[in-house]
Image (spheres, rainbow, N blue to C red):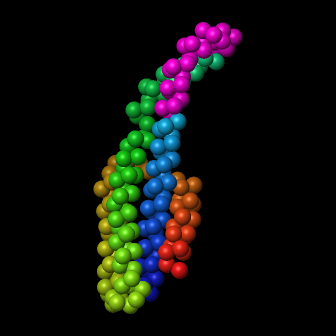
């Protein structure tokens, strides 16, 4: 029973590692696309407006949009989320590695049920503490696509590593 609990916790930690990595990549991509849009519009919109007089209204909208994005960009959550995701990812990766290292003792019956339960509880507590520390005051909406991909990656990893 406790061996199964420990295995499930090990798997959950591995899913979290991949989830946080996938989520961070998406946040970085959003930030990158915003920066690319702003760079392109700021460097080409004035010249394009002068050249393409037939589309002045469209270019005026693009320029206005880029100005609004420039104004609100510091308020967007991507950078704070990226920092929190990277920090939490490091903490959860350490826990995941620790759980994998200790899996040998669980799988080989080297630990009693009581010892396994204590290690399992410690992993859960440390995971919760890491989330509280790294995500303090930062909203992290669930990301279904990152989670589905993380579950697939964790399954592949665990299958190739432990079977």
Asked whether 40 falls inside the magenta stretch, the response is: yes
Majority secondary structure in the magenta region: helix
Q: Is residue 137 magenta?
A: no
Relative image position of residue 123 (x, y in whole percent): 34, 72
- Residue in the image at 48% along x and 60% along y: 18
| Residue 64 visible somewhere in the drawing | no
Pick the residue in front: 138 or 115.
115
Residue at x 47%, y 38% (from the top left corner) = 31
Furthest residue to the front?
160
Establish if 157 lies above or below 54.
below
Q: How far across and down, in percent of the image, does residue 30 sit?
A: 51, 40
Is 55 placed above or below 87 here? above
Q: Is residue 143 visible?
A: yes
Image coords of residue 49 (percent x, y): 60, 12
* Outermost right residue: 54
Question: Is 11 displayed left or right of 113 in the figure?
Answer: right
- Name the residue rendered at 34%, 48% in the picture: 137
Which quadrant of the structure image shows residue 100?
A: bottom left
Q: Residue 119's x, y, as percent?
A: 32, 78
Q: Camera-side residue: 114 or 45?
A: 45
Q: State the extent of the magenta-drawn residues as a range.
A: 34-57
Residue at x 33%, y 76% (from the top left corner): 121
Q: Is residue 32 above or below residue 146?
A: above
Q: Image quadrant for the N terminus? A: bottom left
């Amino acid at each position: 029973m406790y061996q199964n609990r420990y295995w499930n916790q090990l798997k959950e930690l591995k899913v979290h590692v991949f989830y946080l990595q996938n989520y961070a990549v998406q946040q970085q991509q959003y930030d990158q696309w915003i920066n690319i849009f702003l760079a392109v519009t700021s460097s080409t919109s004035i010249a394009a407006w002068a050249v393409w007089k037939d589309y002045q209204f469209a270019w005026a909208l693009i320029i206005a949009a880029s100005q609004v994005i420039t104004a609100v960009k510091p308020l967007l959550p991507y950078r704070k989320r990226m920092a929190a995701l990277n920090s939490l990812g490091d903490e959860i990766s350490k826990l995941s590695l620790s759980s994998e290292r200790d899996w040998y003792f669980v799988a080989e019956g080297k630990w009693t049920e009581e010892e396994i339960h204590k290690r399992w509880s410690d992993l859960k507590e440390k995971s919760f503490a890491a989330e509280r520390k790294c995500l303090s005051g930062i909203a992290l909406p669930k990301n279904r696509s990152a989670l589905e991909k993380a579950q697939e990656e964790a399954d592949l990893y665990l299958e190739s590593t432990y079977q």
